[in-house]
Image (tube, rainbow, N blue to C red):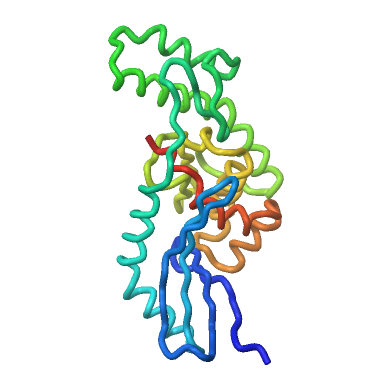
Amino acid sequence: MTLFYMNEIHFKDLTIEHICKKTLKHSYISIKTEKTDLFTQTKILLKTPHVSKKFILNLLEEKETWIRNKLAHAEQKKPQKSVNLEDEVLLFGEIYSIDVQEAENLRKFLEKNRINSRENILKCYDNFYKEYAKIYLLPKVIYFSKLMGLSYQEIKFRKMRSRWGSCSSKKVITLNTNLLKIPNEFIDYVIVHELAHLVHMNHSKNFHSLVLKYIPQATTIRKNFKNINNFGD
């Protein structure tokens, strides 16, 4: 006889592993960090006896602040990928020499930089990512929008610290220029994710089904997304 089952709960923007165990007397929420060869994975684990969906929702609402504080604390402990400014550039999850062809505009920005302060150098990098986003990300958006048969009003690119992308009710899609710093499979996922919001302005089952149709590994990618190093700086 099965004494427990495990499923996945989507609460707002959080993905939670739920273990229902009949022998439990109380409910427990924990934040678990696991190291693998590729990622440091941070998971939210919820263990309950057999309870209603309403009970679970109320529990998550009550503990949301605690959960987010624990996640933020775990995020701060993750090792960050960093580059040697003016010598290296971070692209698609890998660190390259600034001499690579893709970094041509970065070199130009740095050459025009008259005040050689760290702040100005970082601005050169930000400008480079914004320009390269138009070259690299825009064709991807056009490709997937045609593939999905969807149309948008406008595409914007800007550096964001808390979101990888957004889609407004006016069909304006904004993509974080820091996407250029993470692996391609995650970039494609974000683009399809935001395009899917043109149809579903929520994270419903139908929304995730639409994303899965064009990104078959979406479930795995979504789980690993929060384990990517924070490239927001």
Residue at image coords 44%, 65%:
12
Q: Give residue 215's position: percent from left, percent from top.
A: 68, 52
Numbered-mark total: 0
Q: Work out whether 172 lies above or below 136.
A: below
- Viewer-side residue, 104 vs 41: 41
Q: Give residue 105's position: percent from left, percent from top.
A: 50, 15
Q: Work out whether 180 lies above or below 98.
A: below
Q: Give residue 84's position: percent from left, percent from top.
A: 43, 21
Q: Work out whether 147 lies above or below 104.
A: below
- Viewer-side residue, 196 vs 111: 111
| Quarter of the picture holding the C terminus | top left
- Viewer-side residue, 31 vs 222: 31
Side of 131 where 77 appears, left or right: left
Side of 217 where 12 appears, left or right: left
Residue at image coords 53%, 25%:
132
Residue at image coords 38%, 58%:
71
Q: Work out whether 146 lies above or below 200.
A: above
Residue at image coords 52%, 16%:
98
| Quarter of the picture holding the N terminus | bottom right
Side of 166 where 136 appears, left or right: right
Side of 229 where 76 appears, left or right: left
Q: Give residue 170's position: percent from left, percent from top.
A: 46, 49
